[in-house]
Amino acid sequence: MSKPQDRTVSRRSDGTWANTRNDADRASSLHSTQAEAKAAAKQMLQNQGGGEVTVQGRDHKFVDKDTVAPGKDPSSVKDREH
């Protein structure tokens, strides 16, 4: 079950990469590369208390998923996929 602050990184039709909160209609930030969007999503999650970042590839298939720990307590959220 995803938490409200969990984020998805996906490519938009104009070629930019969007960092979007899963419960939001609009992107939180837009980036020229997937790596930049993923880094921004991880930073935002760390500041918001941790959560999951899911990354979609160019073909819109999910290619990566990372668990981000809260900024002040790195041991509270465990990444079970890596």
Image (spheres, rainbow, N blue to C red):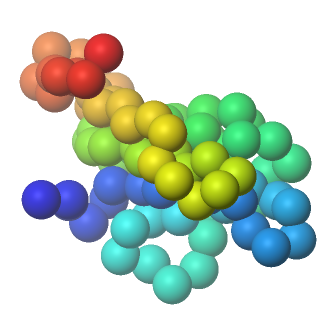
Residue 46 visible in the picture: no
Quadrant where the C terminus sits is top left
Report x, y in % for residue 44: 49, 45
- Number of numbered discs overlaid on the protein picture: 0
Q: Is residue 13 above or below residue 65?
A: below
Report x, y in % for residue 19: 60, 57
Report x, y in % for residue 65: 38, 37
Q: Is residue 46 left or right of residue 18?
A: left
As rendered, which of 59 and 27 lies closer to the eye?
59
Residue for point 44% across, 78% down: 24
As rendered, which of 60 and 2 lies closer to the eye?
60
Residue 5 visible in the picture: yes
Q: Is residue 38 above or below residue 29?
A: above
Q: Residue farthest to the bottom?
A: 25
Residue for point 20% across, 59% down: 2
As rendered, which of 62 and 19 lies closer to the eye?
62
Q: Is residue 39 above or below residue 7?
A: above
Residue for point 58% across, 59% down: 60
Q: Is residue 26 left or right of residue 46?
A: right
Q: Is residue 21 left or right of residue 70?
A: right
Quadrant where the N terminus sits is bottom left
As rendered, which of 3 and 66 lies closer to the eye?
66
Q: Is residue 26 above or below residue 63?
A: below
Residue for point 44% across, 65% down: 21
